[in-house]
């Protein structure tokens, strides 16, 4: 990485470094070498995350972003057209979440204040939250901080998020001739799973998805194996518990059920986000307190005791070939971070 002439230049350089989830090593090494060259204190924790630190006054203000992206094939080449940044190769841009990485790192390059700021760069956010789950919290000198990892206009604050469950149902049976065996045991199990999925989808303030269906059989043969997997998201704790009860009710001699709570929902009181609101309004940004079914590192890190707030970064159409972000929003994020640090 070369010393950037602007936050857009830094963003362009970061996007060109492939860092699909599970392939973050190169971008980490580039940032590590760059930070050392610029005299920024940087360490790699035992979980593999990078922590960059400037300033001495405690407690530290935390900034967090993830370096991984969803899959893409070609190298990302950022182009600017009428103030908008896109990938000229027609795939994802990587603004999720390299827009925040660029803004935070660019801020840190020019920062010489007394207030300590720690930039925590995690990995695996798009898949299994490996970075935020393994982050060594003893290396952090504060608990409060900010994340810009929601593809909404700047001014958006994620106030209320739901619980995410990943579920798996596996059905097994003796194989047999599908025309001679009646009733077909696997059809019966299929119907039961379908009824449960339909019931979960009707629970208040909830969303249910079936992501995977697998079977091992040919036509005219009763399958000895069927697997269903999906997610359930809910803003309602009662619905989240009810969904688990419905899934567990499928368990039996032919069926096993696995449920993983990937993240508990949270609610941020207005008093906790008051200073952030003041800063956003000082830039004439309309503050929008948002409810979101999405999951991010913030879920994991708040559940581990950190008081992080997730904010809009101005990106649009993330995870798609139409992904874009305005140069103006990149620059504004840097300025907002400057103000947040100054008023901390």
Image: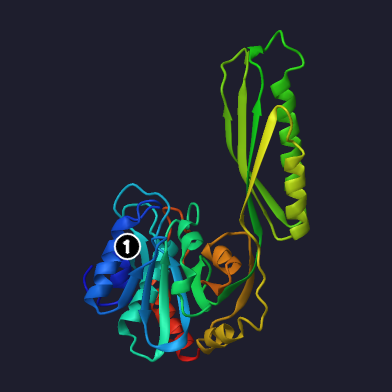
Q: Is residue 78 visible?
A: no
Q: Nearer the viewer, residue 332 or 308?
A: 308
- Give above or below for 139 relative to 242: below
Percent position of residue 338, x then y:
42, 86
Badge count: 1
Q: How is the image coloured?
A: rainbow
State whether residue 269 is above or below residue 92: below
Residue under numbered circle 1: 28
Q: Name the image quarter holding residue 222.
A: top right
**133 sits to left or right of 98:** right
Q: Quadrant of residue 342?
A: bottom left
Q: Determine whether, in the image, residue 123 is placed left or right of residue 145.
A: left
- Kindly give the residue lying farthest to the top in the view shown: 180
Residue 225 position (above or below residue 31): above
The quadrant holding residue 32 is: bottom left
Quadrant of the rendering where the N terminus is positioned: bottom left
Look at 62% across and 12% down and name the residue there.
Answer: 220
Relative to 293, is 279 on the left or the right? left
- Where does the image place residue 75, in percent across and percent down from the top left? 29, 53
Query: Which residue is depicted at the point 46% across and 80% down?
Result: 141
Q: Categorize mark 1 by other alpha carbons within 10 Å: few (<14), some (14-19), many (20+).
A: many
Secondary element type, mark 1:
helix
Nearer the observer, 284 or 147: 147
Percent from the top left, x then y, of residue 187?
Answer: 71, 23
């Amino acid at each position: 990485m070369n010393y950037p002439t602007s936050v857009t230049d830094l963003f362009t350089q970061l996007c060109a470094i492939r860092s699909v989830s599970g392939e973050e090593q190169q971008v980490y090494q580039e940032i590590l070498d760059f930070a050392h060259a610029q005299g920024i204190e940087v360490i790699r924790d035992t979980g593999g995350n990078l922590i960059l630190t400037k300033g001495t006054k405690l407690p530290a203000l935390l900034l967090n972003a993830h370096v991984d992206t969803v899959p893409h094939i070609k190298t990302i080449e950022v182009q600017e057209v009428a103030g908008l940044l896109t990938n000229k190769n027609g795939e994802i841009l990587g603004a999720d979440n390299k827009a925040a990485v660029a803004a935070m790192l660019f801020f840190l390059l020019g920062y010489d204040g007394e207030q300590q700021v720690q930039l925590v760069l995690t990995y695996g956010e798009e898949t299994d939250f490996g970075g935020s789950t393994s982050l060594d919290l003893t290396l952090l000198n504060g608990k409060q901080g900010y994340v810009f990892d929601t593809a909404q206009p700047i001014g958006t604050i994620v106030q209320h998020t739901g619980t995410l469950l990943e579920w798996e149902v596996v059905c097994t049976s003796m194989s047999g001739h599908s025309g001679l065996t009646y009733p077909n045991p696997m059809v019966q199990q299929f119907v039961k799973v379908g009824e449960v999925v339909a019931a979960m989808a009707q629970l208040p303030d909830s969303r249910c998805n079936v992501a995977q269906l697998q079977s091992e059989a040919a036509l005219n043969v009763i399958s000895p194996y069927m697997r269903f997997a999906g997610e359930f998201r809910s803003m309602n704790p009662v619905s989240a518990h009810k969904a688990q009860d419905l899934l567990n009710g499928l368990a039996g001699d032919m069926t096993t059920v696995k449920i993983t709570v990937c993240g508990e929902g949270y609610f941020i009181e207005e008093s906790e986000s008051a200073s952030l609101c003041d800063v956003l309004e000082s830039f004439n940004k309309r503050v929008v307190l948002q409810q979101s079914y999405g999951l991010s590192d913030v879920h994991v890190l708040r559940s581990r005791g950190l008081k992080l707030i997730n904010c809009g970064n101005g990106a649009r159409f993330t995870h798609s070939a139409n992904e874009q972000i305005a140069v103006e929003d990149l620059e504004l994020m840097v300025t907002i971070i400057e103000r947040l640090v100054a008023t901390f």
